[in-house]
Amino acid sequence: MKHYQIRFNQHTDNALTKTKGLSFLFVLNGTLECSINKQHHHINSGDIILLNHDDTLLINHISGNYMQFDISPQLLDNVIDNPAAFDLQPNHNTVPIIKNALAKIGIVYLRKSQYYKLFIEQEIMSLLMLLIKYVPKKQQDMRFTSDHDVRLERVCRFIERHYAQPITLQDMADFVELSPAYLSKLFTRKMNMGFNQFVNDVRLEHVMQDLIHTDDTMIDIALQNGFTNAALLSRTFKKQTGSSPSEYRKQHQQPVTRITTHNISKRELIIRLSPFVINDERQFIETPEIGRNIDITFSNNHDMIHHFNHIIQVGDMDALLSEQVQQQLITCQKEIGITHVLVKDVIESPNLISEEVSTDERISNLQRYNKVDACLDFLTRHNIGLILTINPIQDDETYIKHLSDFLKHVTMRMDAHEDINIKLYVKYLNMKRYKQIIQRVSIFIPNIKVLVHLNVDAPGDTMDMIQYDEHIEQVVFDANQNDIINYEATDDAVFEHAKHHIVDKTKKVQAFLAHHRIQKSLVLLNWNTLTGDTHLTNGEYFRGGIIFEQFLQLNKMIGTIGYWLNYDLHTHHAINEKEYMNSIELFHQYNGKRPAFFTSHLFKKLLPNILYHFENCIVVGAPHHFQIIVYDAEHFNPYLTLNTVLPFLDNKEVTLKVNDLLPGTYRIKHYTLDKEHGALYQVWQSYNTQSGIDAESIEYINRVSYPELRVSDQTVQKDFEYNLKLLTNAIHLIDVKRYIE
């Protein structure tokens, strides 16, 4: 049974409702006009009202937004022996703490964070403890004339709270450990009425309120007030009041008017809630933290980490002439490894190859391929291969002539002992055009290798090409989680499905190839985790741990991963925002490294042998030198990130224990990649101005936007223990190496 209900701006009618359990009414902005127990209240922005069990609420007008948080009477009965009515005054010193708890509950509920249900349950317990310890209790009207009896008081309180449920004299007698006969006499003597009449009086009071203030049907009113059917209600009501329920409603019913409220996005609600969050450890009640103990024992399962090859997209080939691009590629080669750079079709690229000109020279001094030569020289010096996209726009004859001229030049200028590390990438070609091109290319590069793009939903001629041509070495596919999400309308189930999309797409490609008895290495070229569909969400949503999770899941499934090199090249070649979101780049502007770069860098550091792997923890290496990787991979709507104002959503304490190590002293290198260490966008926005960012600020931003590194020694007798704080989508790599004695 659900112990709570959370609503935002949800009231359909100007109708009276009765509180079941406890209910908090929290105005986030604007004002709310209402009647509570027939008394008028004007609630301002930031104010809360606590309604106790059986309090009546009538909302008259709302200009703004509010949150209502209900705690069920069943939970109150289970955790509190004698649930009381609380007298929470607006100036009570617990009010800021209660607002803090409600704001956190609302934010976690809207964002559906990992363990959000557990978090809310813990916050409810903290709220109840706060109310019980610090908030004054109301005096309860127990309908006694004088000389009360504790046992009778307990029975009356139970009936007041549970009148909607079946209640028998035997049940109540058992409840207070009396005989039914004695309890019946006690009622008659003390209350001047019989047991059943008391129960019916309580029920009929609530029935009257429903008849006056609601449009509910008679059967609904009967059932929600403890009567088994409308006929029984009618007989009891007429006997008690002298009129039927219908006649009573006709005489006393208040007009019901419709109230409409404007819709508001989840992101806007989170923004409204966040100012009420107190990020201060000095609170009455500590914020619940999700902690975890990881107990690690090494095993020899012969499983391995397989490092990926990397293809970096730069758009037009002449981008390689840029000093910044060259510097970034050299950095990538050193820190994550590159096999090839992918460029657009060189024959169709403007300004790359100079036009032929008329000259009276026997051999023209104009070097048509001087830009191409400079690009090839750079790649050769740094042992980086080149992948040429084949995407003809010109007619076949003209295109093949220009391609032949280009390849003739490239092959003739290479030294005898140099390998021509060039491949082709084919995406949109029919079989006829493909054969024409590959036959001509093979004249110049007989062993040319080809990457062919496969769309399993519309394969076209791709399968014929793969089966026809031995030059095809790898199959390329795309997988983008953003493609299956409508961020404005999607529900939580779709987000849950989206987090498996990349792996599911990979399996689909594998199954498709296996069905056609084809064994080729896979290249995941254009891919992305959830980012939202704007630059803002793409930047705010820190997702290093999610990318790392994808690496582990894809570890044995694909051989090569693709990236775009940097933001400027990527946006220049993207047709629109959606296409831009189809891939991940490694650098932002001015050489700033994005978290995807650092994630790939940390993954490249991993030792090959897997010693332990469970959930979000993996240990690799050997007993004398091992690496523990703990990561968080929390998938949620990127629009609901707002990391800068929601630090309380993190705070996941992790305790690591590695059993049965060799005694000795171990060096520990601890790398931390999270939104406080390596999240470029957050730092960038902090230093951005309307006039831009100056050179000094850019240098500083790039200097501080790095993963944290801490180094220490630890003496181990038998077990190694280590503590860390895991923020949302963070990665921790702890490298532990024993000193040689």
Image (cartoon, rainbow, N blue to C red):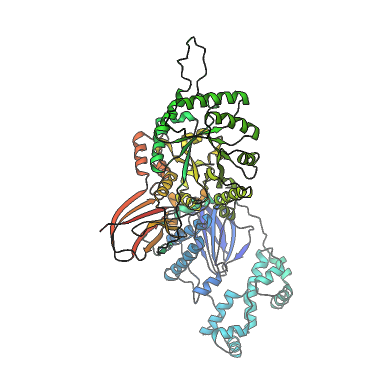
Q: Residue furthest top?
A: 360
Give the camera-side residue of 124 and 673.
Answer: 673
Residue 237 locus on image (x, y percent): 70, 75
Q: Quadrant of the N terminus?
A: bottom right
Position above or below: 82 against 343: below
Q: Is residue 678 left or right of residue 464?
A: left
Look at 64% across and 82% down and name the residue there.
196
Residue 95 locus on image (x, y percent): 44, 61
Give the camera-side residue of 504 and 270.
Answer: 504
Give the camera-side residue of 50 and 715.
Answer: 715
Give the camera-side residue of 626 and 220.
Answer: 626
Look at 54% across and 85% down and name the residue there.
176
Residue 20 locus on image (x, y percent): 57, 68
Q: Is residue 263 visible?
A: no
Look at 46% across and 35% down and name the residue there.
385
Residue 496 locus on image (x, y percent): 56, 55
Position above or below: 691 against 289: above
> Image quadrant of residue 35?
bottom right
